[in-house]
Amino acid sequence: MIDAVSLVLSAAGLVFFLAGTVGILRFPDTHSRLHALTKADNLGLGLIALAVAVQAESWAAVAKIVLIWALVLLAAGTSAQLVARVALQQGGAPGTGRDGGAAPGQRGPAG
Protein backbone atom coordinates (compact mmCIF):
# COMPACT_ATOMS: atom_id res chain seq x y z
CA MET A 1 0.00 0.00 0.00
CA ILE A 2 2.81 2.42 0.86
CA ASP A 3 4.48 1.67 -2.46
CA ALA A 4 1.28 2.52 -4.34
CA VAL A 5 0.91 5.85 -2.49
CA SER A 6 4.54 6.66 -3.19
CA LEU A 7 4.10 5.79 -6.86
CA VAL A 8 1.00 7.99 -7.21
CA LEU A 9 2.73 10.93 -5.48
CA SER A 10 5.82 10.52 -7.68
CA ALA A 11 3.70 10.40 -10.84
CA ALA A 12 1.82 13.53 -9.79
CA GLY A 13 5.12 15.28 -9.10
CA LEU A 14 6.41 14.34 -12.53
CA VAL A 15 3.25 15.75 -14.13
CA PHE A 16 3.93 19.09 -12.46
CA PHE A 17 7.57 19.01 -13.55
CA LEU A 18 6.38 18.38 -17.11
CA ALA A 19 3.92 21.29 -16.86
CA GLY A 20 6.72 23.60 -15.73
CA THR A 21 8.89 22.50 -18.62
CA VAL A 22 6.08 23.13 -21.10
CA GLY A 23 5.65 26.59 -19.57
CA ILE A 24 9.31 27.41 -20.13
CA LEU A 25 9.09 26.36 -23.75
CA ARG A 26 5.75 27.98 -24.65
CA PHE A 27 5.36 31.22 -22.70
CA PRO A 28 6.46 34.41 -24.45
CA ASP A 29 8.46 36.35 -21.85
CA THR A 30 10.78 35.82 -18.91
CA HIS A 31 8.22 36.68 -16.24
CA SER A 32 5.63 34.24 -17.56
CA ARG A 33 8.27 31.53 -17.82
CA LEU A 34 9.46 32.15 -14.27
CA HIS A 35 5.91 31.99 -12.95
CA ALA A 36 5.21 28.69 -14.67
CA LEU A 37 8.52 27.19 -13.66
CA THR A 38 8.59 28.19 -10.00
CA LYS A 39 4.98 27.30 -9.26
CA ALA A 40 4.93 23.96 -11.05
CA ASP A 41 8.40 22.84 -10.02
CA ASN A 42 7.90 23.73 -6.35
CA LEU A 43 4.71 21.72 -6.23
CA GLY A 44 6.29 18.88 -8.21
CA LEU A 45 9.25 18.76 -5.86
CA GLY A 46 6.91 18.81 -2.87
CA LEU A 47 5.03 15.79 -4.18
CA ILE A 48 8.26 13.93 -4.95
CA ALA A 49 9.58 14.77 -1.47
CA LEU A 50 6.34 13.53 0.05
CA ALA A 51 6.65 10.30 -1.94
CA VAL A 52 10.18 9.80 -0.64
CA ALA A 53 9.12 10.72 2.92
CA VAL A 54 6.43 8.02 2.82
CA GLN A 55 9.20 5.49 2.12
CA ALA A 56 11.54 6.87 4.81
CA GLU A 57 12.51 4.60 7.66
CA SER A 58 12.79 7.22 10.42
CA TRP A 59 11.51 10.63 11.44
CA ALA A 60 15.05 11.96 11.12
CA ALA A 61 15.04 11.06 7.43
CA VAL A 62 11.65 12.76 6.99
CA ALA A 63 13.00 15.88 8.70
CA LYS A 64 15.97 15.94 6.32
CA ILE A 65 13.67 15.59 3.31
CA VAL A 66 11.50 18.47 4.55
CA LEU A 67 14.61 20.59 5.19
CA ILE A 68 15.90 19.93 1.67
CA TRP A 69 12.51 20.88 0.22
CA ALA A 70 12.38 24.09 2.27
CA LEU A 71 15.90 25.09 1.18
CA VAL A 72 15.06 24.46 -2.47
CA LEU A 73 11.89 26.57 -2.12
CA LEU A 74 13.95 29.40 -0.66
CA ALA A 75 16.59 29.14 -3.38
CA ALA A 76 14.00 28.96 -6.17
CA GLY A 77 12.14 32.02 -4.93
CA THR A 78 15.32 34.02 -4.50
CA SER A 79 16.73 33.13 -7.90
CA ALA A 80 13.38 33.83 -9.61
CA GLN A 81 13.31 37.31 -8.04
CA LEU A 82 16.85 38.01 -9.22
CA VAL A 83 16.14 36.83 -12.78
CA ALA A 84 12.92 38.88 -12.91
CA ARG A 85 14.75 41.99 -11.69
CA VAL A 86 17.41 41.63 -14.38
CA ALA A 87 14.73 41.13 -17.03
CA LEU A 88 13.00 44.33 -15.92
CA GLN A 89 16.28 46.26 -15.98
CA GLN A 90 16.89 45.10 -19.54
CA GLY A 91 13.50 46.36 -20.70
CA GLY A 92 11.38 43.23 -20.59
CA ALA A 93 8.05 44.30 -19.13
CA PRO A 94 5.80 41.53 -17.80
CA GLY A 95 3.12 40.40 -20.24
CA THR A 96 4.62 42.09 -23.31
CA GLY A 97 6.16 39.01 -24.85
CA ARG A 98 9.56 40.68 -24.79
CA ASP A 99 12.46 39.18 -22.89
CA GLY A 100 14.42 42.39 -22.68
CA GLY A 101 17.42 40.77 -24.30
CA ALA A 102 18.68 41.01 -27.83
CA ALA A 103 17.83 38.56 -30.54
CA PRO A 104 20.61 36.18 -31.49
CA GLY A 105 23.29 38.02 -33.44
CA GLN A 106 22.13 41.49 -32.33
CA ARG A 107 23.51 43.84 -29.73
CA GLY A 108 21.65 44.14 -26.46
CA PRO A 109 19.94 47.25 -25.03
CA ALA A 110 23.14 48.38 -23.25
CA GLY A 111 24.99 48.83 -26.51
Image: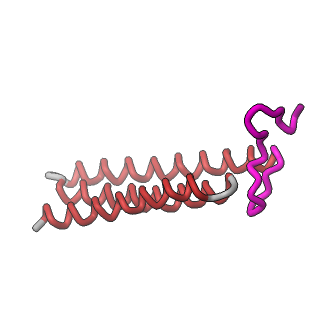
In the image, what residue occupies the spot 77% across and 42% down? Answer: 101
Residue 33: x and y in percent read 61, 55
In the image, what residue occupies the spot 81% across and 44% down? Answer: 90
Query: What is the basis of the colouring in this image?
Result: secondary structure
Q: Is residue 106 magenta?
A: yes
Which of the image's four quarters has the N terminus? bottom left
Q: Is residue 94 magenta?
A: yes
Which image quadrant is residue 95 in? bottom right
Left or right of 20: which side holds 108?
A: right
Which image quadrant is residue 8 in? bottom left
Q: Nearer the viewer, residue 56 or 28?
A: 28
Q: Nearer the viewer, residue 75 or 99?
A: 99
Q: Nearer the viewer, residue 60 or 22?
A: 22
Which image quadrant is residue 6 in? bottom left
Secondary structure mostly seen in magenta is loop
Which region shows up in magenta? Answer: 90-111
48 vs 12: above or below: above
Q: Outermost residue, left direction?
A: 1
51 vs 71: above or below: below
